[in-house]
Amino acid sequence: MSVLNINDETRVAIRIFAKKLTKGITYLESGLVSKNEDCLALNWFTNANVIEDGGYKVFEILGHINGVMPKLIRNRAILNNQFEYKFSLSDDKNLILIQAKFGELLFLAIAGCMTPEYLEGLLEKTYPDLDKDYQPFEIIQGKVATPPSPVR
């Protein structure tokens, strides 16, 4: 297994990909259409982080949350060793959580909210308890989204 090398251009692409993946999975699993003003927060990591941290820390923290983990099949072949995800939706259909795994290389945890500024507020309340420089989720869509870095 090789270690995935990440540069700034790749970071921008991962943010864009995470938005599209979230919209697709959300619609597929719930029929809900995610709008551009909905908040999305992303935590992603690679196999290098898994090796460094000794495991899937974010997935371990979120593991207790119930969700749908479909068996992905194409031409009678199960594809979950290449790509798999867990989709969680709150009872009021306002909050979503997607945990996605691409083989053993790339891992995404995406939180979303259909109520503007609600998720942003939840995250802001959580961060004062953490190290100032460590904010596990980056807002990638919503009012306080980090603008993408220019791709050269």
Image (cartoon, grey):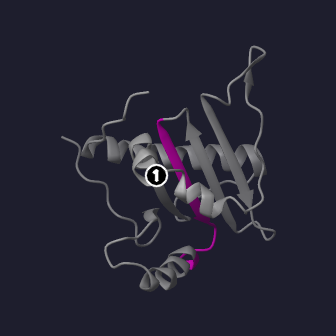
Please identify the quarter of the rendering in which residue 83 is found: top right
Tell me the quarter of the image containing the C terminus.
top left
Query: In this rendering, is residue 92 above or below 59?
Result: below
Crowdedness of circle 1 by 10 Å Cα count: few (<14), some, many (20+)? many
Percent across and percent down for residue 111 are 58, 62
Which residue corresponds to the image point at 31% horizontal and 73% vertical from the top-left? 133
Percent across and percent down for residue 96 are 67, 61
Query: Which portion, as a residue range, is magenta?
Result: 105-118
Which residue corresponds to the image point at 59% horizontal and 45% vertical from the top-left? 100
**Drawn side of residue 42 relative to residue 70, left or right:** left
Front residue of 53 and 116: 53
Question: Furthest residue to the left?
Answer: 152
Residue 70 magenta: no
Percent across and percent down for residue 84 are 65, 37
Please state which amino acid type lies under the numbered disc 1.
Answer: Trp
**Drawn side of residue 85 relative to residue 151, left or right:** right
Residue indicated by mark 1: 44
Please identify the quarter of the rendering in which residue 79 is found: top right
Query: In this rendering, is residue 123 above or below 67?
Result: below
Tell me the quarter of the image containing the N terminus.
top left
Percent across and percent down for residue 130 are 42, 79
